Image (cartoon, coloured by chain):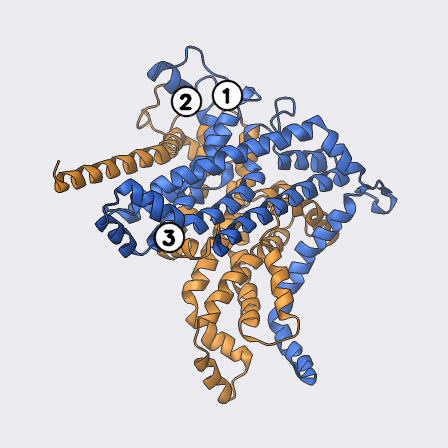
Chain colours: A blue, B orange
Amino acid sequence: MSRPRSLPQLARAALFILPGLLLFATFIVGPMLYSFHMSFFDWRIVRPETSVWEGWQNYADALNDPIFRRAVFNTLLYTAVTVPGQIVFGLLLAVLLDQRIRGRAFFRVVYYLPVITSWVIVSLLFEYMFIGQGGWINYLLRDVLHVVRENIRWLADTTLVFVPIHLLGIWKGVGWTAIILLAGLQAIPEHLHEAAAVDGAGRLARFRHITIPLLRPTLVFLLVVLTIGGLNAYISFLLMTNGGDPLDQAHSVLTLMYEATFTKIDFGYGSAISYLLTAFVFVISVVQIRLLRQRVEA
Amino acid sequence: MGVRAQRRLGQLITYLLLFLGVGIVIAPFWYMVTTSFKPQTLVFEMPPPLWPQPATLDNYTAALGKDRFGLYFLNSLIVAVTSTGLTVLVSSLLAYAFARLEFPGREALFYVLLLGMMIPPVMLIIPQFIIAKSLNLLNSLQGLIVVYVTMNLSMQTFLLRGFFEGIPRDLEEAALIDGGSRWTIFWRIILPLSRPGLAVVTIFTFLYSWDEFPWAHVAMKEASRRTLPIAIALFQSEHLTEWGQVFAASIVALIPVVIVFVVFQRHFIRGIASTGLKG
């Protein structure tokens, strides 16, 4: 390290790093710190200087609020259903696409269609399909399959509304999960399968003892990314529940944060909710990455 | 059963399952397309016909003529194209600095930048709103653009740094000896050699900016500044049962996305598979 050189070095690099750095500081680092600051106040949006320091009050309020707890439960349930759902169906699809088949490009495009379609459009689409009177799903269940007698009011019930929301989460995500898993499958050397086949291992045994262990880093990666995505569920909840209806029982953590902040204009409380979520996401990520490292060391 | 017959059967099952999946993926889309061609009286017609009788273009003319739809489309296009261009520029500059230049604090800075990938974007919305307000960026397309560029910065810089590091150093060293500056090397050597990487960044940023909802929902309260996702969501909440028009608008909004995707399909799949980018 030659100290006299570092200043000109910095000057030369400045041209390259300054634009990005400026944006990053203004719209990510700054907001993060500011939001942390706000979360300790009864924040007055019109005249911030009159805001009142409240310590951890906003956090305590959130943790004691039954609506917040319900939102946490809803979000965890969504994650617990959609993450395994996406991984299981994604893996099945990846294995199918990994066979010698014709038209792989066609299948890839079709299965990727839900992934590239905006959340707004697919949320409205699922809402339309699950409408109680005249919805296609009810018609299918009642008149075609005869499994129910009455129309089910999917969107008006605080529990049933999660059926379309969860199905949408899986339906939209499977294509992406499958592409990632397919890349993982194709990275497994062919000769391992051949050697095992020579030793008399059947398809299922090879899948269990070769494919799954070698796919584990990919699976852990997916687990981390999909979990973060699940905990951040927002648009489908917002549109299908009209922002937490009925009775504020169908919120996700983020729709509740949105309502607290922009409808009830309680910026401090909203910030506290967003920090609780972020802290939780960080803890989950660290735990999952630890799991990954353990496996590499083992 | 012979090995051959067994393989045949295996293939049959594979295709069967794959087409079953195609059906599950396509059915909702098909339902959407047919509904967009139905007259309002038939949007809840059961069983849903494979193709509406009579089919009509009324929903398209009504939805596109209504609520300044053309303006929303233009807003979306301006925002998506500008955000994409700026993201490619800013993140490749950053990525080059991290890949090739020596400067104090480089490693630390890179890790701070990576942190940006772990932050849930929606948590930033509240303070971004306040900052955008104080910078007079609310209700303006620029306000969307700067935030979209920033939100994409970490991921795309990370991706491009990997790309640039794969370019042989010899090329640059030869240019340096000939008296070229880092700046000319970046423009004349690095960027032209990185077209596949830049294509991936372009596609992802375009799709992200075209589809983004949460930030636009907060930042754009003025009707004339809406982008398509906002316009479609609000349209539905204002015209509750006019599903034909909602889906006519949705399909028009979806067309650019599908075109971009089909054209760049190969880059796209490679990009996702190699980087784990979330589409």
- Could you give the CA–CA distance between mark 2 and mark 1, rounded to whole angstroms? 10 Å
Q: Quadrant of residue B267?
A: bottom left
Marks 1 and 2: in contact by CB < 8 Å? yes
First in residue order: circle 3 vs circle 1: 1
CA–CA distance in space, label 3 to label 1: 37 Å
**Residue A183's disc number:** 3
Instruction: Say which of A124 and A289 sits in front.
Output: A289
Q: Which residue is mark 1?
A: A154
Q: Amino acid at mark 2?
A: Ile
Tell me which corner region of the image, top left, top right, bottom left or bottom right, holds residue A227: top right
Q: Residue at x 63, y 35 (%)?
A: A253
Left or right: A205 as drawn, with respect to B125: left
Q: Chain of mark 2?
A: A
Badge 2 and badge 1 in a common chain: yes
Secondary element type, mark 2: helix
Tag 3's secondary structure?
helix
Per the image, the residue denoted by label 2 is: A137
Give, as a three-letter code, the residue at label 3.
Ala
Residue A62 % position (x, y): 73, 33
- Between label 3 and label 1, give the one nearer the viewer: 3
Mark 3 vs mark 2: which is more N-terminal?
A: 2
Image spot of residue B273 (x, y percent): 41, 54
Q: Amino acid at mark 1?
A: Trp
- Kindly identify the residue that appears in the image at 43 percent across and 48 percent down: A216
